[in-house]
Image (cartoon, rainbow, N blue to C red):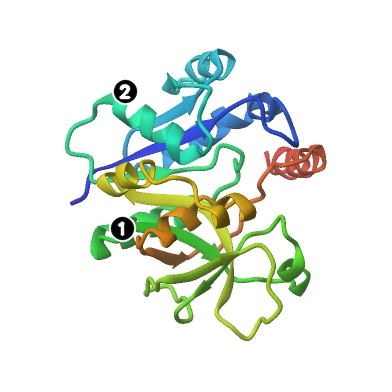
């Protein structure tokens, strides 16, 4: 059985919504809500990787664990690798990079991804959901993934391309969910590669891995979580989650 750790990169200086990890829903910060969900999945230990002491303090206050990292990192992958090195954990096979701004991530989807990496041992595994609205195809804020075949509950096809804008729904196109399960040695390789022009242009760090010959397998998610990028996103999700409670 593979041994997995969940690492959650988080920082206060997000471009579109500064300070968002500490915005509260039901009286608890967004980052601590994500930590709680990750712990409930019961996949492995959970740590937040952050450059901000305010986030570290909030996570500890709410019963989580966090590691302070450099404020010089260009990507979340770089941040979680520093965290992984500082933790000095033994015999870890996979590192799950969980987004810190998606407090309504579905636990069953997270467990499904973990089950598939247990069986298939991919270099990188990720999640994607069916596209329910054609307008998403041209929305550059929504990342799409094109896979080699249709994704089902049981298979784990390879990703062919990640794009922000596509024109044809006839291909195997899905809405990408930014959760990654890396083999620990693969993540170490990725952070040593220079950022590629396409990665920088498209603002998609997974392109760096693919352009250096690393394969990414894609699992089907039944639910597409709401990422919080704007104040409107926050208020909409806050309304939904506080209504449910």
Q: Residues within 10 Å of mark 2 (few under 14, many from 20)?
A: few
- Furthest toward the bottom, the residue is 170
Cα separation between marks 1 and 2: 22 Å
Residue 177 falls in which quadrant of the image? bottom right
Q: Residue at (45%, 32%) from the top-left corner? A: 79
Q: Residue at (43%, 22%) from the top-left corner? A: 66
Q: Describe the element under mark 2 as helix, strand or loop.
A: helix
Q: Residue at (46%, 20%) from the top-left corner? A: 63
- Vertical relation: 87 (above or below) 93: above
Q: Position of residue 46 (x, y in %)?
A: 39, 32
Q: Quadrant of the C terminus?
A: top right
Q: Position of residue 84 (x, y in %)?
A: 33, 31
Q: Which residue is mark 2?
A: 86
Q: Residues within 10 Å of mark 1 (few under 14, many from 20)?
A: some
| Residue in the foreground of this view, choosing between 71 and 59 | 71
Q: Tell how many labels.
A: 2
Q: Is residue 40 left or right of residue 232?
A: left
| Residue in the foreground of this view, choosing between 62 and 230 | 230
Q: Is residue 55 left or right of residue 189?
A: right
The mark found on residue 78 in the picture is none
Q: Which residue is mark 1?
A: 123
| N-terminal-most mark, 1 or 2 | 2
Q: Position of residue 110 (x, y in %)?
A: 44, 52
Q: Position of residue 200 (x, y in %)?
A: 59, 49
Q: Residue at (55%, 79%) from the top-left corner? A: 172
Residue 102 falls in which quadrant of the image? top right
Is the Cβ of the residue at disc 1 closer than 8 Å to that at disc 2?
A: no
- Vertical relation: 173 (above or below) 233: below
Q: Is residue 110 left or right of residue 170?
A: left
Q: Describe the element under mark 1 as helix, strand or loop.
A: loop
- Vertical relation: 148 (above or below) 55: below
């Amino acid at each position: 059985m593979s041994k997995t750790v969940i690492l959650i990169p988080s920082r206060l200086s997000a471009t579109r919504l500064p300070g968002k990890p500490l915005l509260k829903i039901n009286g608890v910060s967004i980052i601590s809500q994500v930590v709680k969900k990750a712990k409930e999945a019961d996949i492995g230990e959970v740590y937040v990787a952050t450059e901000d002491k305010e986030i570290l303090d909030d996570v500890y206050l709410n019963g989580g664990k966090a590691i302070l990292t450099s404020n010089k990192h260009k990507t979340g992958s770089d941040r979680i690798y520093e965290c992984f090195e500082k933790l000095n954990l033994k015999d870890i096979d996979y590192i799950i990079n969980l987004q810190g701004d998606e407090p309504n991530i579905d636990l069953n989807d997270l467990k499904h991804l973990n089950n598939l990496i247990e069986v298939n041992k991919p270099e990188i595994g990720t999640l994607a959901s069916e596209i329910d609205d054609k307008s998403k195809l041209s929305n550059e804020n929504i990342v799409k993934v094109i896979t080699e075949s249709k994704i089902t509950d049981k298979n784990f096809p390879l990703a062919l391309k990640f794009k922000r804008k596509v024109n044809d729904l006839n291909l195997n196109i899905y809405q990408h969910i930014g959760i990654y399960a890396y083999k620990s040695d693969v993540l170490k390789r990725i952070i040593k590669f220079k950022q590629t022009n396409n990665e920088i242009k498209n603002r998609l760090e997974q392109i760096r891995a693919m352009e250096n010959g690393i394969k990414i397998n894609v699992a089907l998610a039944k639910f597409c979580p709401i990422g919080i990028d704007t104040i409107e996103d926050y208020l909409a999700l806050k309304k939904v989650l506080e209504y449910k409670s």
